[in-house]
Image (tube, rainbow, N blue to C red):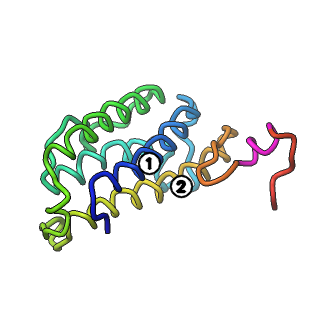
Amino acid sequence: MYTTIAEFLADWEYESGTTIKTFHELTDGSLAQRVTPSGRSLGKIAWHIVATVGEMMQAAGIRFDAPVDDKAVPSSASEIESSYKRANESFIAALPAQWHDENLSDEIEMYGQKFTKGNVLVMLVKHQIHHRAQLTVLMRQAGLRVPGAYGPSQEEWALFGAEAAE
């Protein structure tokens, strides 16, 4: 659990930056990529990441400008990226204005369960990491470059003149 807003924002800065790098590699044509015919498309997963920032944090009581999940998935990769950037900027401005360190242990009800505010922030980070990992699989299938998140990606190793670890 996060115990300070600053602690969360330090993690979030890295994670949201990595998500932006990932979104930046998407193409309009790649948004239809699926693992299976009935699975979510790359575009749907990306849009879910965008919309969840607003949906989850607004369910927790933070008010800011963000798109909603029931909006149709944009057909433009750049619209997904720019929507995420706008929602993220709005969120990181709203969070420290509306929640404070001393309240992160307060319990709130979300989705029929009780969570501390600090744990809601943990869930947001983990949710984004989970779905970003799904995106990277679909990106590889679509022939896109995958940026590294916690170390160099295969493509980044090649830029360094080294072979990626197997």
Query: Is residue 71 toward the left or the right of residue 7 in the image?
Result: left
Direction bottom: furthest residue? 113
Asked if labels 1 and 2 touch by Cβ distance under 8 angstroms, the answer is yes
Q: Secondary structure at mark 1?
A: helix
Query: Is residue 30 toward the left or the right of residue 123 in the image?
Result: right
Query: Is residue 51 toward the left or the right of residue 136 in the image?
Result: left
Query: Tag 1 or tag 2, which sits nearer the N-term?
Result: 1
Badge 2 amino acid: Gln
What's the mark number on residue 134?
2
Query: From the viewer's perspective, is residue 146 above or below residue 29?
Result: below
What's the mark number on residue 45?
1
Which residue occupies 48% across, 56% down? 38
Query: From the viewer's perspective, is residue 5 above or below residue 143?
Result: below
Tell me residue 6's x, y (percent): 31, 51
The stretch in magenta equals 153-159
Tell me residue 162's x, y (percent): 86, 46
Q: Residues within 10 Å of mark 1 (few under 14, many from 20)?
A: many
Q: Nearer the viewer, residue 41 or 126?
A: 126
Which residue occupies 47% across, 46% down? 14
Query: From the viewer's perspective, is residue 160 above or below residue 86?
Result: below
